[in-house]
Amino acid sequence: MLPAVEAWLTSRTSSAGDWPPARLLELKQDTTVSVVLPARDERETVGEIVRVVLDELAGLVDEVVVIDSRSADDTAVVAAEAGAAVFAQDEILPGLKPLDGKGEALWKSLAVTSGDLVVFVDADIRKFRAEFVSGLLGPLLDDPSVVYVKGCYDRPLDGAPTGGGRVTELVARPLINLHWPLLSGFIQPLSGEYAGRRSALERVPFISGYGVELGLLVDLLDLAGLDALAQVDLGSRAHSHQSTEALGGMAAQIMLAAWSRLERQGKMVAVEEPATRLTQFRRAGSGHELRIRDISIAERPPMLSL
């Protein structure tokens, strides 16, 4: 491990328990905080998350916003009944051609929120705890030089306390170690729980698909430097796990995101454009079924450019 990363781990890694809400209220002063949940078909969990944030972090959080990403169920209704402000993803900035993916919802949330600090939380977390928000706010409220905070945690899998985060371990971490070793100290580089200063988030592009987390890490490292980034241990995080086939599509988008940043930074020159159609096979009776998936990604420019 690079000496700079070892020093960063010591100075910029903390635990959610280090940041009790009472202390954060003292640090907050006139800083405003927005909590954003991108949600698609998450009616089973989104309401509880909204209620916990509003009930347990009153005074610390100024607004809770759910970006409904074309849900087929009543996610939007459940979120609104729990007290969130709900926006349909495609109705935000309607003059722009809609894009697909989680990153699109995150990027558009910057246009309908007002907080100086923006906390992003996935809407599929089970047994949600307020520490998922308060822990991320701690370093930002305590130190004005910190612009971005990632959550890290254990990820249970099939009854075991760890083992989740397969795409992180098999794809994201090897890519980071090879190409951006200064980021190798991040335990969960693809975590969906992170927070940042609006002043920084509005200055970087957002990849529309699953590569948004990797893209933000790389771009914010370029923008602000390693010491402006931090991570907080949030304990354990439980959520529904996706199939291996679905994880293959996620992994492909993350690799495309890495490719885009390597090319932009002059670290890679493409002889041919990467394929954006993923071929997958599954057993079907005595033979195999072929499936071809579109794994292309798009990108929104820095919000300030609008």
Image: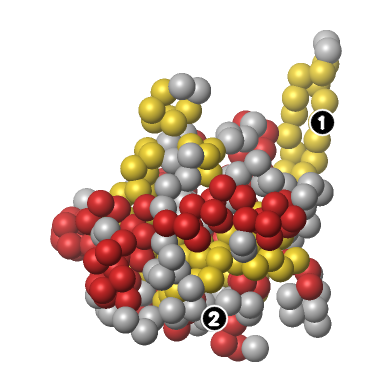
Vertical arrangement, residue 41 with respect to residue 138, above or below? above
Which is nearer the N-term, disc 1 or disc 2? Answer: 2
Depth check: give the residue in front, 122 or 128. 128
Residue 150 picture quarter: bottom left
Of the residues tagged 1 and 2, which is closer to the observer? 2
Depth check: give the residue in front, 274 or 135. 135
The x, y position of residue 93, in whole percent, is 74, 80
* Residue located 62% across and 31% down the image: 244
Vertical arrangement, residue 248 with respect to residue 48, above or below? above
Vertical arrangement, residue 171 with respect to residue 230, above or below? above
* Residue located 65% across and 73% down the image: 108
The x, y position of residue 47, in whole percent, is 61, 50
The amino acid pointed to by label 1 is Leu
Q: Rounded to the nearest whole Å, what is the CA distance between mark 1 and mark 2?
A: 46 Å
The label shown at residue 5 is: none
* Residue located 78% across and 73% down the image: 91
Residue 24 picture quarter: bottom left
Q: Is residue 197 visible?
A: yes
The x, y position of residue 243, in whole percent, is 64, 31
Q: Is residue 103 visible?
A: no
Residue at numbered disc 1: 290
The amino acid pointed to by label 2 is Ser
Residue at numbered disc 2: 114
Depth check: give the residue in front, 58 or 293. 58
* Residue located 42% across and 47% down the image: 129
Decide if residue 91 is on the left or right side of residue 161.
Answer: right
Give the crowd class for mark 2: few <14, some 14-19, many >=20 residues within 10 Å.
Answer: some
Decide if residue 176 is on the left or right side of residue 274.
Answer: left
Secondary structure of the residue carrying tag 2 is loop
Decide if residue 41 is on the left or right side of residue 181.
Answer: right
The x, y position of residue 119, in whole percent, is 47, 65
